[in-house]
Amino acid sequence: MNLNAAQPDFSALLSAAYLGPLFVGWLVAMVTNAVLQASLTRATVTHLSGEKPVFAQCLTVGVSMILPMIGIGILLALGVGLAMLLLIVPGIILWLCWSVVVPVYVQEKVGVIEAFGRSMALTEGSRWRIFLTMLLVLVGLWLLSIPVGLLTVAVAATGSVIAVSLVTAIVSALGSMVMVTVQSCVYVELRNVKEGVAPADLEAIFA
């Protein structure tokens, strides 16, 4: 009996043919996510302000903010990730503090670092409510991830790395769309409650 025949060839996982498409998929997902977050944030705030979002204008905003949005994502991931390594609770608190950093940056046209500080100021005193809101959203996304995970496994069984990368990117984008929409709604509500800025006034203030 040939035992070697049953052993998988793990060296193939380190080949350029395997890692190349994965890297391209990751890069495309990162850029797409940056554009999507900025564009959808702009569209959501515009809609909540009583105006009709224009696709071309929202997309232009997203494209123009690719690099800053990637920077925000990296800083957010590093900050929350390091806090999570220390203790889970500080990581969650920091995530709540920065939960509206994207809509702050997109809508208020401030600097990247200033957007983090502004997010902390806006969320102060409201983080428990934000936590409960985000928890409900995350539970909903987790429930939806079960059939999506089965779909990903089915696609992976075909042996197509590109197909797996594509499905992963689509799923990531959909999850990001939900979170960005919720964060934008939270941002608009915080501006209204804490600063008395009605949704209809947001466009006029930061136009």
Image (cartoon, helix red, strand yellow):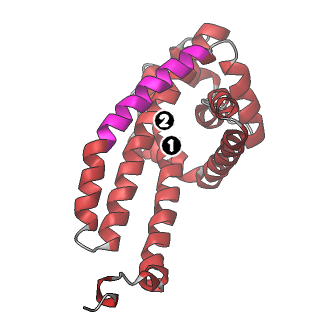
Residue where numbered disc 1 is placed: 37
**Label 2 with label 1: CB-CB less than 8 Å:** yes
Q: Which mark is residue 175?
A: none
Asked if the magenta segment contains residue 52, the reply would be no
Q: Residue at x 24, y 91 (%)?
A: 1
User: What kind of secondary structure does the magenta stretch mostly adopt?
Assistant: helix
Q: Residue at x 66, y 27 (%)?
A: 93
Query: How many marks on residues?
Result: 2
Amino acid type indicated by mark 1 = Gln
Asked if the magenta segment contains residue 142, the reply would be yes
With respect to residue 59, does 199 lie above or below? above
With respect to residue 191, does 79 lie above or below? below
With respect to residue 184, does 144 lie above or below? below
Q: Nearer the viewer, residue 74 or 161?
A: 161
Please state the horizontal and vertical placement of residue 161, each as a whole percent of the image.
Answer: 34, 72
Please state the horizontal and vertical placement of residue 56, each as a whole percent of the image.
Answer: 42, 46
Place residue 141 in its image quadrant: top left
Magenta part of the chain: 128-145
Place residue 146 in its image quadrant: top left
Please state the horizontal and vertical placement of residue 120, each as a whole percent of the image.
Answer: 72, 25
Amino acid type indicated by mark 2 = Val
Q: CA distance from mark 2 to mark 1?
A: 6 Å
Q: Nearer the viewer, residue 157 or 62?
A: 157
Residue 24 in sight: yes
Q: Secondary structure at mark 2?
A: helix
Disc on the earlier residue, 2 or 1: 1
Q: Residue at x 25, y 52 (%)?
A: 150
Residue where numbered disc 2 is placed: 180
Badge 1 crowding class, 10 Å Cα cut-off, few under 14, some 14 to 19, many 20 or more, is many
Badge 2 crowding class, 10 Å Cα cut-off, few under 14, some 14 to 19, many 20 or more, is many
